Amino acid sequence: MKKQRKVILVGNGAVGSSFAFSLLQNMSSVELVVIDINKEKTMGDVLDLQDVTPMTGSSIVRAGTYEDATDADIAVVTAGVPRQPGETRLDLFKKNTNILKAIVMPIVNSGFDGCFVISSNPVDVLTTITQHLSGFSKEKVIGTGTSLDSARLCVELALKLNVLVSEVKNAYVLGEHGDSLFATFAEATVLGKKLSEIAALDKKSLQKLEESVRKRGSRIIDLKKATHYGVAVCLMRICKAILTDEEIMLPVSAPLVGQYGQKGIYLGTPAIIGTGGIKQVIEMQLVPAEFQKMKLSADKMREVLVSLE
Ligand code: NAD
């Protein structure tokens, strides 16, 4: 029997269980091992998820331990405390760093040699810390970064222009997955044409779109206490690209090694994703004001990281 590609998932909460559901629907043959301190709920979800597999292919789902990471291709980390109404993602920093520390080392000690994919918040900081703790090469550690925000920008643009979301392409949100994120519209196309040719959106309208994206997560949390479907599909998309060596450009939290004048941290930018993780970080052409916004995001991330020392 051909060995299935193997994913371990640490954190079976709202985000983790939604990711598991999405992965099983979008990959017909994977082995998914779920790890969480809440063993009872995990076993319930595992049984429920096993019932998905006959309809989608031949995947295997089971609860497991860190030793299962030894021959895994990907370790997805969604464990952590989520935001409460009124909290920022950075407020979660200390609690989630401690949780992350309890997860990364047992995975590394298992002999794991795959890619880490992180979505716990603050995701850019926690992705940077995962790379430091694991000692893995930078391309093997990826955060979901601004993938969710970029999806939200496409949704907001489609609603604004009254087009199908599939007609909106290359609209990216860059920088921190958090309050200092910013949107760049220069490469955005709608119905195959440059955004500027399709609609005369003035600076104020574009700022309003960016602000809607910035506030969308809090809006959802105020309404239903959690956001999980969007990021779950972003995680699935990144994992699928790694498992199938897709070499596709996705917005992620990627290691900057000079791009945008920054290095030593992970931040949201498009990158080419395939087997082995990040194949290339794509540096977008930014106007000086956007370049400055990237610097602000980077400075903010460094401030948080320094506070840990
Ligand atoms: P949740 O409370 O529903 O789930 C968290 C899970 O982590 C729980 O099942 C809990 O038992 C588990 N957990 C905690 N400590 C653990 C440990 N040491 N080992 C194993 N499991 C452990 O929370 P959620 O809504 O799923 O959110 C999880 C994280 O994802 C939060 O940090 C949240 O802010 C983040 N998030 C990120 C994005 C993004 O775009 N990056 C979007 C939404 C949520």
Image: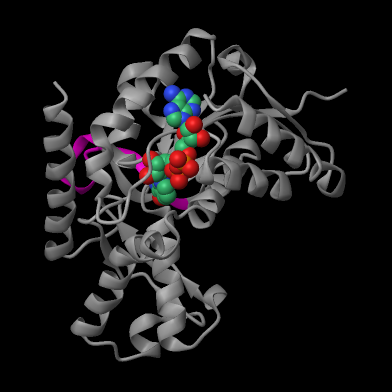
Q: Quadrant of residue 298?
A: top left
Q: Is residue 237 left or right of residue 209?
A: right
Is 45 one of the magenta-colored residues? Answer: no
Of all residues shown, which one is farthest toward the front?
40
Q: Quadrant of residue 148?
A: bottom left
Residue 128 visible to the viewer:
no
* Residue 209 locus on image (x, y percent): 30, 76
Ligand 1 appears in which quadrant?
Answer: top left
Q: Residue at left 79%, top 45%?
A: 52
Question: Is 149 or 97 nearer to us in this picture?
Answer: 97
* Residue 217 locus on image (x, y percent): 36, 60
Question: Is 240 or 271 nearer to us in this picture?
Answer: 240
Q: Quadrant of residue 219?
A: bottom left
Q: Where's the C terminus, which quadrant?
A: top left
Residue 264 visible to the viewer:
yes
Q: Residue at left 32%, top 33%?
A: 126
Q: Is residue 226 above or below residue 133?
A: below
- Start-end of magenta stretch: 250-265
Q: Where's the N terminus, which quadrant?
A: top right
Is 261 one of the magenta-colored residues? Answer: yes
Question: Is 284 or 163 nearer to us in this picture?
Answer: 163
Q: Is residue 76 left or right of residue 198?
A: right
Q: Is residue 162 above or below residue 109?
A: below
Q: Residue at left 11%, top 36%?
A: 303
* Residue 121 locus on image (x, y percent): 34, 41
Q: Residue at left 40%, top 34%?
A: 80
Magenta stretch: dominant secondary structure: strand
Q: Is residue 23 left or right of residue 226?
A: right
